[in-house]
């Protein structure tokens, strides 16, 4: 399975219109995009049209994805990689086609994508795997006392807590790259944080709170210079702009189906086959083994080595439909559309008194997750007020407490856009947000 | 009344600003006290609450809630419900205070099905609408859960006449209040 042609110069560039290529969707095009998502036509509360601005948490699913799962289940449902009957053949074919499609979507080959339960599990497989090297014959990637793992202060808990645990198990030390006041990584002292002791550099491609898109080439170069493994959390990048992992040169990456039109219950751990081959399995059992005796077992090659037990078959097939859906629309056009909406969102909230944006206030190198702190009003109350008008946003710490603490907040209100979001929804969010402080007596 | 105004009744908005009982004060000599720290990991809301109990003036009746002092931060529902708690239970005999907590919990967990008894619940009846918002049940219960926890230990201290209460218990409740 060959990867689609990708312009290496634009890989990982969320700029869209800045890149001078694709245009945002026209109003008619957005209407056509939206028509494929049944849930978007529902109303909320007192007949308000739904304005779904919570795609950073989970995206909605188009009819193509829903139909693909149903078609599979009503025609070919069977256990994969076993059985000689027709349904098992069809199921196995569809399941492995899905792997090739998802791999191709991020510029990899099909044997470089491991199905996981979600992105969190993918990160745990890596962090646990590196820790377990200490038990068997130590491999070159094994974490040991004296080693250092470097993360950033803007990580989702999923790319922080597993590394804290790995360090606790192995005696390695956790270090992190701090943030500047604008919501970007403070790379001034990168050379002092990433050193010869660094064994792993794990960082997010795009922050789920700040929206910041990090400079992957610079971070990968720093890691490579000291021989450290790079682990990329691509949950907020792969759904929103073209990402080619091989061109980005990261060793491993994780991303999740449900943030990119696919179902819950499936994610991917993807990366270099030689790195996956050097990683020991941490979940063992059926499907991931070669020869089993009462005394011992040999394991299969990746990706199956990491896929013990019955896999998420119908979810994989639905994810295939999701990447096809995104590709048909064009990731460059989706990125351009979201870039336009992000600019509008940032400009709108900038004019609101008592509203502070966490993260960059311009749309450059930024995705459309915009988190705000409303002075004098708790995010839960903000979210409730917005919901009363049909506007769905995320409130809380978004599984990223340290980044909130860095900017003097315990929680925030986040609007996040996607391919089906409209300028009208962005405007409604801004207008309604502007009335929150008055209602709660904080203005 | 809109759904929003049913949830955010004026009484609630007023209490969220007034925050009766806010600020941790030392217990008076002769009283027993205990602290409870409650944290909602979903949103980061937290409250630290001190329940202070004294023996009844005639020495025979049940002990009395002498003070409810608290600090913390959170949404208007959690702040207001803790403020209302202070207003309702200070001065009450302990059995009545614990009965009130039960009454409040039943109302909040009823998903809006239980008609609150305003005679019993007073301002707390304004929280009846919270039960219809499953995500907000924990907010309304935060301070009350802290009170229940602190009160039981303060009473135990009073009866044991332990001169120094132990260190504050920290509990991170993951129990779904609406379960």
Image (tube, rainbow, N blue to C red):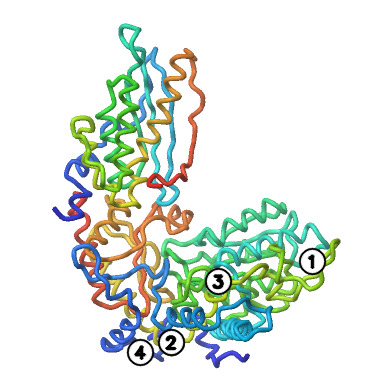
Residue A364 position, x and y percent, is 40, 76
Residue A247 visible, this angle: no
Count of numbered labels shown in the rendering:
4
- Estimate how packed mark 2 is, as few (under 14), some (14 to 19) or many (20 or more) residues with alpha carbons within 10 Å: many
Q: Are marks 4 and 2 on the same chain?
A: yes
Name the element at disc 3: strand
Tag 3 and tag 2, C-beta contact below 8 Å: no
Q: From what the image shows, is residue A26 above or below residue A82?
A: below
Chain under callout 2: A
Image-based side of B54 in relation to A354, left or right: right
Q: Earlier along the polypeptide chain: callout 1 or callout 4?
A: 4
Mark seen at residue B93: none
Location of mark 2 (residue): A332
Residue B113 vertical placement versus A57 (above, below): above
N-terminal-most mark, 3 or 2: 3
From the top left corner, tell me how far across and down residue A280 is, in percent. 74, 66
Q: Which mark is residue A267?
A: 3
Q: Callout 4: 10 Å neighbours few (<14), some, many (20+)?
A: some
Q: Nearer the viewer, residue A347 or A292?
A: A292
Depth check: A405 or B45 in front?
A: B45
Residue receiving disc 4: A23
Residue A240, position as x, y percentages in the image: 44, 78
Of label 3 and label 1, which has the lower sequence position?
1
Which residue is rendered at x = 72% and y = 69% of the image?
A: A279
Residue that numbered label 1 is attached to? A139
């Amino acid at each position: 399975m060959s990867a689609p042609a990708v312009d290496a110069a634009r890989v990982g560039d969320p700029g869209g219109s800045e890149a001078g290529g694709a245009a945002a969707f026209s109003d008619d095009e957005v209407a056509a995009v939206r028509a494929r998502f049944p849930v978007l036509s529902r109303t909320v509360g007192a007949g308000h049209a739904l304005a779904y601005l919570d795609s950073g948490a989970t995206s909605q699913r188009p009819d193509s994805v829903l139909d693909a799962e149903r078609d599979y289940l009503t025609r070919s449902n069977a256990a994969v990689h076993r059985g000689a009957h027709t349904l098992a053949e069809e199921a196995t074919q569809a399941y492995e086609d899905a792997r090739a499609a998802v791999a191709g979507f991020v510029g990899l080959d099909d044997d470089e994508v491991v199905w996981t339960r979600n992105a969190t599990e993918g990160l745990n497989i890596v962090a646990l795997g590196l820790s377990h090297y200490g038990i068997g014959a130590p491999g070159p990637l094994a974490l040991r006392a004296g080693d250092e793992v470097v993360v950033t202060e803007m990580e989702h808990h999923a790319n922080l807590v597993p590394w804290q645990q790995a360090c606790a198990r192995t005696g390695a030390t956790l270090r992190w790259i701090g943030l500047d006041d604008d919501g970007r990584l403070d790379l001034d002292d990168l050379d002092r944080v990433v050193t010869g002791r660094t064994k792993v550099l794990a960082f997010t491609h795009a922050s789920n709170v700040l929206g910041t898109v990090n400079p992957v080439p610079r971070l990968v170069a720093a890691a490579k210079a000291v021989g450290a493994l790079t682990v990329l959390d691509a949950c907020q990048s792969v759904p929103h702009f073209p990402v080619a992992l091989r061109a980005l040169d990261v060793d491993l990456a994780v991303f999740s189906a449900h943030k990119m039109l696919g179902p819950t219950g499936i994610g991917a751990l993807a990366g270099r086959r030689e790195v996956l081959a050097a990683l020991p399995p941490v979940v063992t059992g059926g499907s991931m083994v070669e020869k089993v005796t009462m005394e011992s077992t040999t394991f299969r090659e990746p990706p199956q080595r990491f896929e013990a037990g019955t896999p998420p078959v119908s979810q994989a097939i639905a994810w295939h439909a999701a990447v096809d859906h995104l590709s048909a629309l064009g990731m460059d056009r989706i990125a351009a559309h979201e870039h336009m909406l992000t600019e509008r969102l940032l400009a709108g909230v900038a004019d609101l008194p008592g509203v502070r944006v966490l993260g960059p206030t311009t749309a450059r190198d930024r995705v459309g997750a915009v988190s705000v702190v409303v002075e004098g009003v708790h995010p839960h109350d903000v979210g409730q007020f917005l919901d009363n008008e049909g506007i769905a946003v995320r409130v809380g710490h978004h599984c990223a407490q340290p980044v909130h603490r860095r900017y003097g907040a315990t929680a925030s209100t986040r609007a996040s856009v996607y391919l089906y979001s409209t300028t009208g929804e962005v405007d409604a969010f801004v207008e309604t947000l502007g009335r929150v402080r008055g209602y709660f007596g904080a203005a | 009344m809109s759904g929003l105004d049913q949830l955010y009744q004026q009484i609630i908005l007023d209490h969220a600003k007034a925050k009766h009982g806010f600020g941790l004060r030392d217990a008076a000599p002769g009283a027993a006290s205990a602290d409870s720290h409650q944290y909602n990991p979903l949103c980061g809301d937290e409250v630290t609450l001190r329940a202070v109990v004294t023996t009844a003036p005639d020495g025979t009746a049940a002990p009395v809630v002498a003070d409810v002092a608290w600090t913390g931060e959170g949404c208007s529902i959690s702040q207001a419900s803790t403020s209302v708690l202070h207003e309702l239970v200070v001065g009450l005999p302990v059995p009545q205070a614990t009965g009130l907590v039960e009454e409040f919990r039943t109302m909040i967990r009823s998903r809006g099905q239980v008609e609150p008894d305003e005679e019993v619940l007073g301002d707390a009846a304004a929280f009846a609408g919270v039960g219809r918002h499953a995500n907000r049940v924990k907010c309304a219960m935060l301070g009350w859960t802290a009170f229940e926890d602190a009160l039981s230990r303060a009473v135990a201290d009073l009866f044991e006449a332990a001169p120094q209460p132990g260190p504050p218990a920290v509990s991170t409740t993951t129990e779904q209040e609406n379960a």
